[in-house]
Image (cartoon, rainbow, N blue to C red):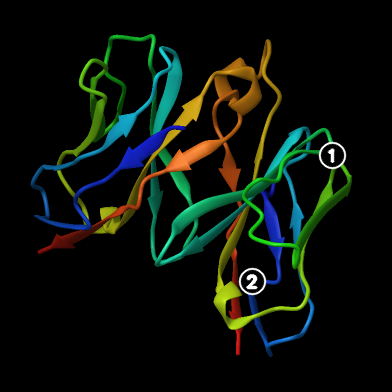
Amino acid sequence: DAGVIQSPRHEVTEMGQEVTLRCKPISGHDYLFWYRQTMMRGLELLIYFNNNVPIDDSGMPEDRFSAKMPNASFSTLKIQPSEPRDSAVYFCASSPPPGAGAALFYNEQFFGPGTRLTVL
Amino acid sequence: AQTVTQSQPEMSVQEAETVTLSCTYDTSESDYYLFWYKQPPSRQMILVIRQEAYKQQNATENRFSVNFQKAAKSFSLKISDSQLGDAAMYFCAYRSTNTGTASKLTFGTGTRLQVTL
């Protein structure tokens, strides 16, 4: 398996522009997480999905942020309009369902390589 | 809510020596998971080691081991025979087993480990 795939790896945009980050989880994983990493705030969970349904979006900073998971193999995190304070590394992670066969991995999240976003 | 504290922003160790990174956490739960993740300059988050709270035995993974003190809510990482490739940010993380929050990881602020020759 190729692991969690994120695109783009780097994004530079101007303030006010729309930014869309993409994630493809590991096949068979039914949990998907979006994290943001900054120097000031460290790693923060923004939102997570289970079976394509958003379960907890309490970490989403404001209405400019939205996330979707239209199917089991794809998720997007959108920022509209973007602001310089949104500059950060955004990670996507996925996790398999608990239960027999996957119990060993029940508690592990597999991270993608991250997208470094710079908003000028 | 759970919190994770890493009080050492930076640590340094000589190659082949041993270093211990500290982590404490706060929780009212009795069952949970604890993790150490490594983030090298490539930014990839890599799971180093995990510990189930109900297990008394400390987890080990090759040169990496933990000292889990449940009563003290302490979860330190020991790296033996340090190698240049161990240089990275290390994050301690907590994961509840409660159904409502079972999947959320709470991270500490990280410790940057330097390995010197």
| A100 up-or-down from B104: above or below | above
Amino acid at the residue labelled 1: Asn
Q: Quadrant of residue A6?
A: bottom right
Q: Residues within 10 Å of mark 2 (few under 14, many from 20)?
A: some
| Residue at the image point whose x is 21% and y is 52% from the top | B83
| A93 up-or-down from A97: above or below | below
The chain letter for the residue carrying disc 1 is A
Do marks 1 and 2 both belong to one polypeptide chain?
yes
Mark 1 vs mark 2: in front: 1
| B56 up-or-down from B114: above or below | above
> For this view, does B39 lie left or right of residue A75?
left
Q: Position of residue B14 (x, y in %)?
A: 8, 56
Identify residue for label 2: A9
Q: Nearer the viewer, residue A97 or A27?
A: A97
Q: Nearer the viewer, residue A32 or A79?
A: A79
Identify residue for label 1: A52
If you read the primary sequence from the N terminus, does the residue marked by circle 1 or circle 2 appear first? 2
Q: Quadrant of residue A13?
A: bottom right
Q: Quadrant of residue A20?
A: bottom right
| Residue at the image point whose x is 84% and y is 52% from the top | A68
Q: Residues within 10 Å of mark 1 (few under 14, many from 20)?
A: some
Specify the quadrant that holds the C terminus of chain B. bottom left
> For this view, does A22 lie left or right of residue A4?
right
Q: Position of residue B54 (x, y in %)?
A: 39, 9
The chain letter for the residue carrying disc 2 is A
| Residue at the image point whose x is 67% and y is 50% from the top | A4
Q: Secondary structure at mark 1?
A: loop
Q: How many marks?
A: 2
Q: Position of residue A11 (x, y in %)?
A: 66, 79
| The furthest residue to the right | A70
Q: Nearer the viewer, residue A45 or A103?
A: A45
